[in-house]
Image (spheres, coloured by chain):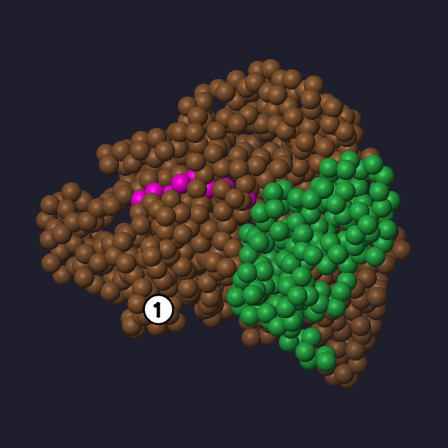
Chain colours: A brown, B green
Amino acid sequence: MSSIQKIDRRDFVKLFGLASGGIILGCSVASDNKDFIPSTQIESFNPNLFIHLQKNGNVTLIASRSEMGQGIRTSLASAIADELEADWQYVSVEQAIGHEKYGNQNTDGSRSVRTRLAPMRKMGATAKMMLITAAAKKWNVAETACKAENHFVINKNTNEQIFFGDLVAAAANLPIPKEKNIQLKKVEDFKYIGKTLKSVDLKDFTHGTATYGIDVRIPNMKFAAIARSPVTFGAVKTFNKDKAEKVAGVEAIFEMPRLVPPTGKFFGMLGGVAVIANNTWAAFQGKLDLDIEWNKGPNENFDSDAFKEILTKKVQETGKLVPGVRGDVSTAFDAAAKTVEATYHVPFLAHAPMEVPNATAWFQGDKIEVWAPVQDPQTARSELAHFFEIPVENITVNVTFLGGGFGRKSKSDFVVEAVAISKKIKAPVQVVWTREDDIQHSFYHATSAQFLKGSMDNNGKVTGWLQRVGFPSIVSSFKPLSDYGSGFELNQGFTNNPYAIENFRLENAKAEAHLRIGWMRSVVHIHSGFGINSFVDELAFAAQKDPVQFHLDLLGKDRIIQGKSKFPFNSKRFKNVLTTTAKMANWGEKLPEGHGLGIAIHYSFYSYVATVVEVSVLDKKVKVENIWTTIDCGLALNKDNIKNQLEGAAIFGMSLALYGKISTKDGAVAQNNFFDYQMTRMKDAPKIHINIVDAMHEPPTGVGEPGVPVIAPAICNAIFNATGERVRSLPLSDLGMV
Amino acid sequence: MNINLSINGNTHAVQVQEDMPLLWAIRDIVGLTGTKFGCGVSQCGACSVLIDGKLTKSCSIPVSDAVEKEIFTIEGSSENLEFLRQAWTEGNVPQCGYCQSGQLIAATSLLDSIEKPTDTDIDEAMSANICRCGTYTRIKKAIHTAVQLKNETR
């Protein structure tokens, strides 16, 4: 064993601190780390938790964030490989289990690259330095006389070279360099970063061999389906299982009480009646054959149409003042040449990832093992420790591929269900949700109502902006009776409004939650982006100004807003994406009859995005013809992957604009499956044109989510441009427009 | 009932309920998990397979209907599927990858019946398959690429 691996964990923290984004740079020997200690025979060089170099040159890089289609396994591996000077052909990627030693693994908020790029580069650079040191020793030359290139260390004087694999034994015995001595590459020298690398998982994706959660198979495992109360937080009153028991393959049926999360953390599980079978189909059939009477509970009368009316009314009245008032809107409104007001709605939405929620669990008395498509494996692990009273170190959460996540799989209620069942039946089990379960028992994107009022002077300059918003808070899923938007929610487009308007006021209306509320791709930005961009378009029309110029005027003079953020807001970058996109779309040129262009801009997850949409409207039916999007996300780690994300965001945004609506009647969700909760399909897909701003010297910012919020408002603004008809309430299908 | 299922040229002797949808027989009984569950009601195409060359949503036909027929899944190989795989790879098509088994099978069926599909042919053939990640632009392009690759090898 190398000496470095004898340093204990505390010394390591002292030596290397947590400077690398919460990841200890070196390999520690804490007992829970034994998987990563090589045997006494040195077969591989493991300078840190993320790099395992074999004697044959193969290098396994560990992916610490969940892969749900955002390409993170490839992106982070490419950052390590670049600094390591690895030849990509030798690289393979392995998924990390859920463990805090990898740093924060919660894959949400478009922050994997933003927070992990620097530490991953350091991991690669450290390993490269050690390989260079090992080679320098062999040649008996100074390290400065050596360089690494494409899986070899090269002696610059003699051009001799040693293959990385041949340095494994020597490098494994070296101390880890001090963090301050680690040199990172210059942007100009990047080999993989900022270029295009194809997904490392393409072979598996095209051969059906990628293992998603639903594909996990454990010897002697059972399959389970759960009938949950149609009304959120309802409970079983009585149930009859006679018919269900007769389904061939059904082995057990029992009631599962709801597990209520402690205030402030975790998600618990809904409970219901579980049907255990020897195959998925039998479990589904058994579930359909149950006869259950529910105690519907407090949400029994929840009707989303009525709720929309209530929210609409509330946002017409003065709400709770949100900090950040500028000037006095009332005075501005009184003095205005013109005022404009409008109310906007977005319904509840469900993520509907193609892979339904599912988890495989094996409760083994004193330990638990789980295989699941989770975005946040560490929280899942802590949650299991809490509910099942098993020490966290005895719980293993294996992270599979996620067949889409979009925020749904950051809530691990389905994992808790699988463990609860495994504990009861004393066997490994896979819980599979039906699509109906997924649509009807989600953690929904909150419905919202927004009232906006603006004033302008004789020149069409905006003088006052009042925005009132009401939506059930995500916090309600952790803390009952959280009836107002939280700071993190309001900061998604409302409080961080970038417009230079003298008189500005934001209010928040009370809104109770009657469904479980959660994050969905781009979260509150969905409705802030819709409301603000729609309203700016209305103001521009009222001012008889071009919407692009109007946005530019609102953004005011170039300025940088630092705040407490590591990522200051730069209005110049925002204007740049706006004008660039307008140019791409030939903004201002004459369009064919029945066509219209609409623009929207939105700053989210520290990225600047602008989108122009072209629609055609024929017999009141809308067709989205073209979408042009520009993103400035700072350093672009993997260009084609970013392009793919933005193409996908355009389609995701279209789905919610055209079809997205979850409604409730008598407390129960009315939609069932893809026939009544529709998605954009290929025949509806427009031509999509993506442009990535070259900003390689800026820090990387979000990519997975920022492409979404602009789509719905750009579509609706385009419809207005084409027809003069203003859409203020989504989705278009409700208005007969698709 | 005891039946033989012929999948990708291999025969599997299985014991199943005759009304079990083919999808679950393939996934849970035979153990080939490349064919995916997406909706269970023939709405998303994730479960697409070919039965005697005909594109079929395996979630919506009973396993008994597939007896004595040749079932082709994503684990299989055919000339068109291989060109499509190559095109999917060149175009870096998948995001999460989950729906791509069904997309590839649907595209194989399309190329099996139309040698050089137009955009409209592709829209028509592929609109039964949902991709929640939204890779439609790339799928369409990759189908054209596959046709090109095939022509180049001739």
User: Which residue is at the front of the view, A72 or B54?
Assistant: B54
Residue range in magenta is A344-352
Q: What is the x, y in percent for residue A356?
A: 61, 42
Residue at the image point whose x is 61% and y is 42% from the top: B41
Q: What is the x, y in percent for residue A659?
A: 44, 47
Q: What is the x, y in percent for residue A15?
A: 66, 51
Query: What residue is pinned by disc 1?
Result: A582
**Does B112 lie within the magenta span?**
no
Is A554 situated above or below B35?
A: below
Residue at the image point whose x is 49% and y is 43% from the top: A677
> How many circles with numbers are drawn on the protein?
1
> Is residue A438 among what the camera can see?
yes
Is A115 situated above or below A139?
A: above
For disc 1, the neighbor class at 10 Å (few under 14, some 14 to 19, many from 20) is many
Residue type highlighted by circle 1: Ala
> Is residue A445 among what the camera can see?
no
Determine whether the residue tagged by mark 1 lies in a helix, strand or loop. Answer: helix
Please, what is the dominant secondary structure of the magenta stretch?
A: loop
Q: What is the x, y in percent for residue A653?
A: 45, 53
For the N terminus of chain B, the quadrant is: top right
**Does A346 lie within the magenta span?**
yes
Q: Is residue A219 left or right of residue B43?
A: right
User: Which residue is at the front of the view, A171 or A724?
Assistant: A724
Residue at the image point whose x is 37% and y is 51% from the top: A737
User: Which residue is at the front of the view, A209 or A724?
Assistant: A724
